[in-house]
Image (cartoon, rainbow, N blue to C red):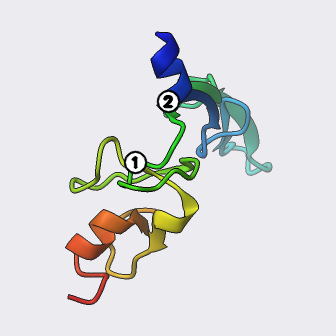
Amino acid sequence: MSEKENDEWIEKTVTCPDCDRGRVAHWKERKSGKPAWRYHLPCTTCGGQYESVICQPKYCEIEGCSNLAEFQCQGHICVGNGWVCVDHWIEENIGFSQSGFACITCWHEVGSGGH
């Protein structure tokens, strides 16, 4: 990364929400009627890595905002890469996003904002 990009972007460690340290527990029934036994396989979501490092903008991508970016919206109407601060991350109630939250831009466009 260039020095200018280094001032605007940061590396962030994220953990996989679907596993426990890269492994997922599975249960196998026994034919004898004894209790099932547990075994672990690598997580298919993260490939067993559990933690990964991503690059994200340091600051909120909403124009005029200089707060630190914390959340990435997955909408199609987002500004830039969809990274916004806490002030621009809003709960939506129409099922637009899986997390139940969206950036302020998407929130207004999909109708959660009241139009």
Image point 73% across, 44% down: which residue?
Answer: 32
Task: Decide which of tag 1 and tag 2 comes sooner along the chain.
Answer: 2
Specify the quadrant of the image occupied by residue 62: bottom left
Image point 53% across, 19% down: which residue?
Answer: 6
How busy is the neighbourhood of tag 1: few (under 14 within 10 Å), some, or many (20 plus)?
many
* Distance between mark 1 and mark 2 Cα atoms: 11 Å
Please identify the quadrant where the C terminus is shown.
bottom left
Residue 9 rendering spot, x and y as whole percentages: 51, 28
Residue 99 rendering spot, x and y as whole percentages: 47, 63
**Is residue 54 visible in this depiction of the protein?**
no
Q: Residue furthest top?
A: 2
Q: SS for tag 2? A: helix
Image point 72% across, 38% down: which residue?
Answer: 20
Residue 64 rendering spot, x and y as whole percentages: 40, 56
Q: Is residue 29 left or right of residue 61?
A: right
Question: Residue 81, relative to residue 65: is it above or below?
Answer: above
Q: Nearer the viewer, residue 76 or 86?
A: 86
- Amino acid found under the numbered disc labelled 2: Glu
Q: Is residue 102 left or right of residue 57?
A: left
- Amino acid found under the numbered disc labelled 1: Glu
**Is residue 52 visible in this depiction of the protein?**
yes
How busy is the neighbourhood of tag 2: few (under 14 within 10 Å), some, or many (20 plus)?
few
Specify the quadrant of the image occupied by residue 107: bottom left
Judging by the rendered image, the residue that carries numbered circle 1 is 61
Residue 33 rendering spot, x and y as whole percentages: 74, 51
Judging by the rendered image, the residue that carries numbered circle 2 is 8
Q: Answer yes or no: do the residues labelled 1 and 2 have beta carbons within 8 Å?
A: no
